[in-house]
Image: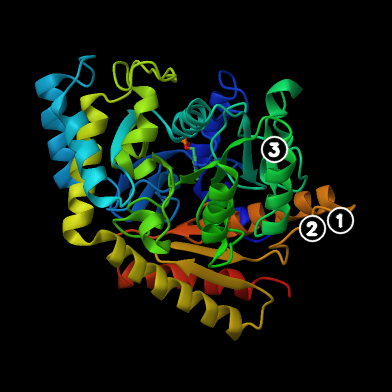
Amino acid sequence: EGYLGYFETKCAGSKKMIGEAKQYIPGGVQHNLAFNYPFPLAMAKAEGPYLYDVDGNRYVDYLQAGGPTLLGSNYLPVQEKVIEVIKECSPCPGLFNEYEMKLAKIIHDNMPHVEKYRSLASGTEADMTAIRIARTFTGKSKIIKVGGAYHGWSDQLVYSLHIPGTQRFEAHGIPKEVSANTQEMWPNDIDGLRKLLEGNQKDGGTAAVIVEPLGPESGTRPVARDFNAKVRELCDEFGALLIFDEVVTAFRVGPGGAQGYFDIKPDLTVFGKIVSGGYPMAGGVGGSEEVMSCVAAGVNPGKPKAYVGGTLSANPMSCAAGYYAIDEIVKLDAAKIAGENGDKLCKGLQTLIDKYDLPFVAWNTGSIVHFEVTGAMYLDAADPDILKKIGQRQHALEEFGAALTANGVITLAGSRIYTSMADNDETIKETLDAFDRVFQNMEK
Ligand code: PLP
């Protein structure tokens, strides 16, 4: 508990600001990545691998805003281009612009299974749009997702009601008629998926199976190496589309995303985060010409169309930011560099875990590093105490995350690290030293 003193003595400015914010914002913060324990920190500056709070404290930034800043924060070559574009065309002239085309082309050129691409304004919208396209294309209604996977917060995908024990369990305000069309399978449960697909045959069929290709929450619950291939086979057998949610993995696990990494062809790919280079309005859907023709008026006349809109979708600021960021990522091999940083960090973490003989585990796919410090990596849906255990896990993660923060390192939910191209031996050492101090003070 010693680290709580840090927040009291060093973070007075944040504490004051959150106190004021509570008068105007429910709970004081509206960003769902903000950690609330013991109170949220207010950030004032971001630069390269670091974040600085309003009290001037510096942190190694492994939250990376949830994943978009693969090049590091405020990466100047992209920032300069974005400012030029804003000055020239304004952030939002509202009509077709060259950057909309350039972004679609660079995504098409790098992602193996994106022939056509449509820009949207967030990952949530993109997931929502992908299932709408799948339903339009197949004429079927049911969607199957993996329990615990995050596909944004739309009515149809946010919840995990069928399988308790998954993170969005508390999502209320969704009519039963809406959630009735979304089903969940347990990670890696291929037999369970077959049963759902078979059951749906009598009930209009399955439009799509949507997965995070590394497993729920970017691989927090890892899937078996052949999981995606087996899902692909079942989708083909039952005439369902396979949707890869690559909001995190696209351009992060490599220029070809997870579809390149696993060599699997999804029918639709969902994008977010890196596709606007860390700037606002990151989202899009891509796929084959045939499937994507469902969103274009005048293409394939007579075929059903899905309505897709968005006042700010495809604005030149977001598209230019995404285009220039991806261009740099590809040219500089940023995913590889960030991935090597992730490898180093993960190896160092495992060495520390062994040093203190702690029952923890660290694993990574390149720049996506996970560490589990609660002993509850796989929760069993059938466990009668599951809700209690989720609560305990949540609390343990909050405490662990806060202890790391007090030691100068900000992570995602106390259990995930996104490394970037901006990390270096110094930031990795700072991080491992912080973990060392936290582990030292932990009770076994
Ligand atoms: N899909 C995945 C895999 C995500 O990690 C996220 C966000 O973290 C989303 C979708 C939703 O994206 P957004 O927050 O841009 O709506």
Does the beta carbon of the residue at mark 1 sit less than 8 Å from ligand 1? no
Q: Is residue 42 above or below residue 59?
A: above
Q: Check the image and name the residue furthest to the right.
A: 384
- The residue that mark 2 highlights is 380
Q: Amino acid at mark 2?
A: Asp
Counting from the top left corner in percent of width and height, residue 239 is at 55, 42
What whole-number distance in Å separates the C-alpha atoms at marks 2 and 1? 5 Å
Residue 367 visible somewhere in the drawing = no
Front one among 286 and 120: 286
Residue 360, quarter of the rendered image:
bottom right
What whole-number distance in Å separates the C-alpha atoms at marks 1 and 3? 30 Å
Closest to the camera, between mark 2 and mark 3, is: 3
Q: Residue at x 70, y 31 (%)?
A: 171
- The residue that mark 3 highlights is 201
* Upstream in sequence: badge 1 or badge 3: 3
Question: The residue tagged with tag 1: helix, strand or loop?
Answer: loop
Q: Amino acid at mark 1?
A: Asp
Front one among 312 and 345: 312
Q: Quadrant of the N terminus?
A: bottom right
What whole-number distance in Å separates the C-alpha atoms at marks 2 and 3? 28 Å
Dot 2: within a 10 Å radius of its alpha carbon, few (fewer than 14), some, or many (20 or more) residues?
Answer: some
Counting from the top left corner in percent of width and height, residue 298 is at 29, 16
Contact (CB < 8 A) between labels 2 and 1? Answer: yes
Q: From the viewer's perspective, tell me whether residue 306 is left or right of residue 321.
A: right
Q: Is residue 348 above or below residue 213?
A: below
Closest to the camera, between mark 1 and mark 3, is: 3
**Residue 150, disc:** none
- The residue that mark 1 highlights is 383
